Amino acid sequence: MNLDIQNEIDIIKKSPSAVLIFKSLQNYLEKEKKKRLHFYETVREDQKAEFINGNIIIHSSVMLRHSNVSFYLANLIHNYLSYKTIGVVHHEKLMIRLTRNDYEPDICFFNKEKADNFKADQLLFPAPDFIVEVISKSTEKTDRTIKFTDYQNHGVKEYWIIDPEKEFVEQYFLKNDEYELIQKTSSGQITSFVIDGFSTQQQYQLCK
């Protein structure tokens, strides 16, 4: 269990109001569960929508540089995986269902063991092994806080945060249940821990 979660549990356990807190939280989460089911029933395929801490978030259209970066990187990974049977990559519009929240990451990768169990008509997917979020002014806070913590706590082994405006990538890797910043780089050269053998620089050279 993540140390932050254990600390939060320990604080509640020491409180004389622990039972009241638990009951109140149960009631709240039951109401949230109904709202989440409504989200599944009403969200449209043409929307990029997420369910985060009880709120339905409908995202606006992205800037061209955001689209270019995510599409380009997804293509690099896809091309690499076309001759390496180690998993699959998806670019946007795939709903990741975690314990409480639902996200549509810009890019996500599932190892072969997970991907082999997916069905053609599947709508909700488990935590991926690797996620990329391309930040914007409207999403940066969520990508760096709620999603960061949620991805970490659900065992997403590698997480990249890309800033297309400032042109840098932050690479995080899960160590002892917590993300460690491996590097923050503007070089365009980055090697994945999870997608075995994948390097942005190497794939760029192959695609030239």
Image (cartoon, grey):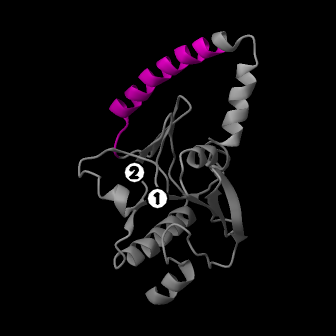
CB atoms at circles 1 and 2 under 8 Å apart?
Answer: yes
Secondary structure beneath disc 2?
loop
Q: Is residue 55 visible?
A: yes
The residue closer to the viewer here, 50 or 180, is: 180
Q: Position of residue 79 (x, y in %)?
A: 39, 77
Q: Residue at x 75, y 25 (%)?
A: 11
State the residue at coordinates (71%, 21%): 12
Q: Is residue 30 magenta?
A: yes
Q: CA distance from mark 1 to mark 2?
A: 8 Å
The secondary structure that dominates the magenta segment is helix
Position of residue 177 in the picture relative to residue 103 (left or right): right
Q: Position of residue 2 (x, y in %)?
A: 65, 42
Give the residue type at disc 2.
Leu
Nearest to N terminus: mark 1 or mark 2: 2
Query: In the depicted view, which residue is nearer to us: 96 or 197?
Result: 197
Name the residue furthest left: 120
How many C-alpha atoms fall within 10 Å of the one at disc 1: few (<14), some, or many (≥20)? Answer: many
Secondary structure state at the residue bearing disc 1: strand
- Residue toward you, 103 or 43: 103
For discs 1 and 2, the disc positioned in front in the rendered view: 1
Q: Is residue 16 above or below residue 192?
A: above
Q: Which residue is mark 2?
A: 94
Q: Which of the 4 image quarters holds residue 157?
A: bottom right
Where residue 83 appears, x then y in whole percent? 34, 79
Disc marking residue 108: 1
Residue 208 seen by the camera: no
Screen quadrant of the N terminus: top right
The magenta segment: 21-45
- In the rendered image, residue 75, in percent from the top left (x then y), is placed at 43, 72
Question: What is the total number of numbered labels drawn onto the structure image?
Answer: 2
Under mark 1, the amino acid is Cys
